[in-house]
């Protein structure tokens, strides 16, 4: 558990005093003033808690802790203040800028109790992060794998969309990229209400009837209805609903997620139709439909499976997880089992093995394998 505490004050005697009193109980780091404190956050973090004096030269504690909140939002913030500044400290607490404030002079016991509470708060925050990033992400991964077996066409596209979104988020240095990746994984879930023959027509760029186009265009709304009542997926469902280009409802995080999904979907449509990365990005730019130029620039360097892997003809027994299906895999009775572009997972391999032992599979088939 992280027990690192940053103490910031512009009085050396205060820093030395607290460091001497608390170093046996916590991993103490001190900074003489707000600017060195921010430097410590950037270069020596993460810290479980930061304690700052209110009255400091150049930048007061409120301003300093506001910047700490931007640099390290998970770090718990505590303020030290004199009796004369009590109203300012209370206002800071009420505005949500700090976790707790302590009055000077602060006894060792009071500081120790406050820091123990801060460390517990930090532990809870990180546990919540792990729940969202790992547990929830893992559950959604299993769900999308299962749905991929039911609807291979839609979820082979979801695999590609996730790759594009991950690449754009990394190139732009976006925070909370896992949320965007989660939205990408679920971005095609609305297609479960679209008949398979319509999806096959869509994948092969065949003309759709008016009713079919309306059904396809409504898949983001279907996804939102499916997901909006699931706890902790409210932002994700809003991102997916906005991928069609309608104004995104919610925070700037939701708006960015919708923009990523929209660019990834339209880019994928062009690449599947035969365009290169640069051609697809240039076409989106020519459309003048409000795509963020930074997203299009990032897409020009996105790895494409067909360019970064080697095509091989394999049987089911030779198939390995991590490969990508390069042509539709069908059972001998014509059932579509895996769609071109679908990532091979343990679940996919198990399904193919089951069909191979019973109905039979048309093999060998083409896959894209990592280069040696």
Image: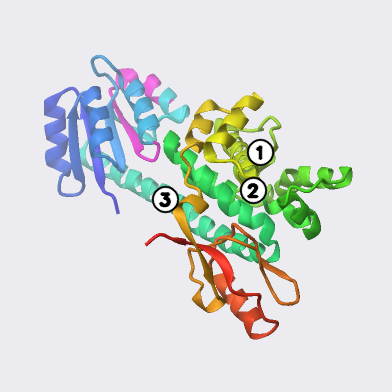
Of the pair 254 and 192, the residue shown nearer to us? 192
| Rendered view: 228 above or below 91 | below
Q: Residue 79: say if magenta.
A: yes
Residue sitting at the far bottom: 357
Q: Position of residue 157 (x, y in %)?
A: 62, 52
**Residue position for label 3:** 124
Residue at left offset 82%, top offset 47% = 215
Q: Position of residue 146 (x, y in %)?
A: 63, 66
Q: Secondary structure at mark 3?
A: helix
Q: Is residue 166 visible?
A: yes
Dividing the picture into quadrants, the one containing residue 245 is top right
Q: Are marks 1 and 2 in contact (CB under 8 Å)?
A: yes
Residue numbers of the magenta segment: 73-90
Q: Residue 220: say if magenta.
A: no
* Quadrant of image for the C terminus: bottom left
**Residue position for label 1:** 243
- Between discs 1 and 2, the one toward the N terminus: 2
Of the pair 229 and 223, the residue shown nearer to us? 223
Residue mark closest to the camera, 3 vs 2: 2
Q: Secondary structure at mark 1?
A: helix
The dot on residue 269 is none
Q: Is residue 89 left or right of residue 3?
A: right
- Between discs 3 and 2, the one toward the N terminus: 3
Q: Gap between marks 1 and 3, in whole Å?
A: 33 Å
Of the pair 58 and 300, the residue shown nearer to us? 300
The dot on residue 187 is 2
Residue at left offset 21%, top offset 26% = 36
* Quadrant of image for the N terminus: bottom left
Q: Gap between marks 3 and 2, in whole Å?
A: 30 Å
| Rendered view: 258 above or below 224 | above
């Amino acid at each position: 558990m992280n027990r690192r505490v940053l103490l910031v004050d512009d009085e050396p005697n205060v820093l030395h005093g607290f460091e001497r009193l608390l170093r046996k109980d916590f991993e103490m780091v001190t900074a003489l003033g707000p600017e060195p404190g921010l430097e410590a956050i950037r270069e020596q973090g993460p810290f479980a808690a930061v304690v700052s004096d209110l009255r400091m030269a150049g930048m007061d504690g409120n301003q300093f802790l506001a910047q700490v909140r931007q640099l390290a939002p998970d770090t718990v913030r505590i303020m030290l203040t004199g009796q004369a500044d009590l109203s300012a400290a209370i206002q800071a607490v009420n505005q949500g800028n700090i976790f707790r404030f302590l009055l000077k002079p602060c006894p060792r016991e009071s500081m120790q109790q406050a820091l123990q509470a801060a460390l517990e708060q930090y532990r809870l925050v990180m546990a919540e992060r792990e729940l969202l990033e790992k547990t929830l992400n893992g559950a959604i991964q299993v769900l999308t794998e299962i749905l991929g077996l039911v609807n291979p066409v839609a979820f082979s596209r979801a695999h590609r969309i996730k790759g594009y979104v991950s690449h754009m988020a990394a190139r732009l240095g976006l925070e909370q990229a896992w949320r965007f990746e989660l939205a990408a994984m679920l971005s095609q879930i609305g297609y479960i209400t679209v008949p398979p023959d319509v999806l096959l027509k869509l994948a092969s760029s065949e003309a759709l009837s008016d009713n079919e186009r309306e059904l396809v265009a409504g898949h983001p709304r279907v996804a939102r209805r499916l997901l909006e009542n699931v706890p902790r997926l409210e932002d994700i469902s809003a991102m997916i609903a906005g991928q069609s280009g309608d104004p995104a409802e919610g925070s700037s995080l939701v708006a960015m997620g919708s923009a990523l999904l929209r660019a990834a979907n339209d880019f994928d449509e062009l690449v599947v139709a035969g365009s290169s990365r640069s051609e697809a990005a240039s076409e989106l730019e020519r459309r003048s439909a409000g795509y963020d130029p930074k997203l299009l620039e990032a897409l020009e360097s996105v790895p494409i499976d067909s360019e970064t892997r080697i095509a091989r003809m394999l049987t089911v027994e030779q198939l390995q997880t991590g490969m990508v299906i390069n042509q539709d895999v069908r059972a001998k009775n014509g059932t579509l089992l895996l769609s071109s572009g679908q990532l091979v997972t343990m679940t996919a391999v198990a399904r193919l093995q089951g069909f191979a032992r019973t109905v039979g599979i048309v093999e060998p088939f083409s896959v894209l394998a990592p280069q040696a």
